[in-house]
Image (cartoon, rainbow, N blue to C red):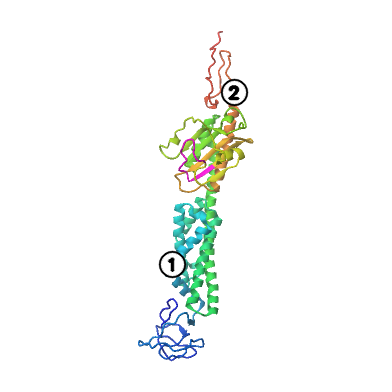
Amino acid sequence: MGRLRSNRAYVRCKPMTQSGTRAEGPPGTPLIRVLGICARSGAAAGPRAHAGPGSPDPDGLCTPVRRNVVLVGFTADSLVSRAAREVSLRADQLIHDVERSLQRGVPEVWEDPDIARMTAKNVAEHVLAALAGLADGIEPGRIETPAADADRTGRLARHGTPLSVILRAFRLWQGVVVDRLLEEMPRLTGDADLISVAARKLIVTMAGYVDRMSEQGVAVYQRERDRRLQWRLSMVNEAGMRIGTTLDIARTAQELADLATERFADLVTVDLLDSVLHGNDTPVDGPVTLRRVAQRSVVEGDPASAIRPQPLHTSPQGSPPARALITGQPSRHIGPAAPRDVAGGDQLAHSTLVVPLRARDSTLGVAQFIRHHNPDLFDDEDLLLAQEIAARAAVAVDNARRYSMRVPPPSPCSAACSLSTPRSSRPWRSPTATCPRGPKAG
């Protein structure tokens, strides 16, 4: 028999016995047993034959028989191979079903359009690779995985996708493919024992392929994590050298914004509590009042890049910045962290980190790290990095604040008196550093 298609089989008639008949065809064609009635002779083709003769066939072919073909001499491997070939003819529908399953099971992967397109392409390549390997009878360890699979896993890691989500996606698409192949086997043979053996073979093969994919994915993810860890340590060291170089509050906040935008954020804003700037460690009762003291954007010509004194503003009650100031806990968000920012520069944000500035058990303000140009979302590693460099900046700001509070106000003094405090170390509106009396005679 040259081909089996759906539930029908056409064979040349020969004298039929209880042991079956050999169909004409090329060498190696397997024996089949037609469990029905031969159209020409009306003889029963086997012990499970239906009653009654078939219709004459002038071409010498048997009448098509539905769901009654048993493959004699068919092995479990060949049944798996044949099922994979049949399912491959409907690969588009299978890929669509896999995508729907992933959308329900791992919706996190489909939130970003670019990641969703990459995932859909990766799914299609994996499904086709698995079907091709099964159809050719290739061992699981030798089935070729998509060439771009490692790069895509690394992209998911940089995007902030948890490793557990990636591994769950592997198992979900494996389940859909196995189900379709198991559904196909009874259409090819009625031998329950053969189907059982082939099903076990199929499950072992698919599990081996997915296990190898998972191992490769974990290795890529771990390499990316190690690389990120080294990068984070270097960033923390750089922050120690670049943040807090003076005892000027505004300049220290600006150093934080400059470092973050150069390395991992597109826009950074730093707001300090107005009460802190006036010497109070804790804000007064009522709405939290903030003053924008620093901001920086990577976009050339962005108004947020021009640092100018900002008017006082309040964070909406219940907004991420307000919660960070009250609880002292950082947070990560998709989109802008608040409905409207003072500078108006974060409305195109697709990922935001909100980190309180805390030093010596006091909350001094809040920093927001925003991405609107970089397509990758912030992940937990980015949040940890933001906390570490913000903590260094908070200590430097607190040192500058405490130092400025200790500087005595100007008063009449001798001619040799001059305020020796460096200009960069003065508080917000430090008076001039010249003694109004002038030099003393003699």
For label 2, the crowd category at 10 Å Cα-Cα, with few meaning under 14, some 14 to 19 and many 20 or more, is some
Q: Quadrant of the C terminus?
A: top right
Q: Nearer the viewer, mark 1 or mark 2?
A: 1
The residue wearing badge 2 is 407
Would you place residue 91 above or below residue 117 in this image? below
Q: Which residues are magenta?
A: 338-353
Magenta run includes residue 226: no
> Residue at horizontal 51%, vertical 47%?
334
Q: Is residue 308 visible?
A: yes
Q: Position of residue 122 (x, y in %)?
A: 46, 59
Residue type indicated by callout 1: Ala
Would you place residue 328 above or below residue 229 in this image? above
Residue type indicated by callout 2: Val
Would you place residue 420 above or below residue 258 in this image? above
Q: CA distance from mark 1 to mark 2?
A: 76 Å
The residue wearing badge 1 is 91
Magenta run includes residue 339: yes
For label 1, the crowd category at 10 Å Cα-Cα, with few meaning under 14, some 14 to 19 and many 20 or more, is some
Residue extending farthest to the front is 52
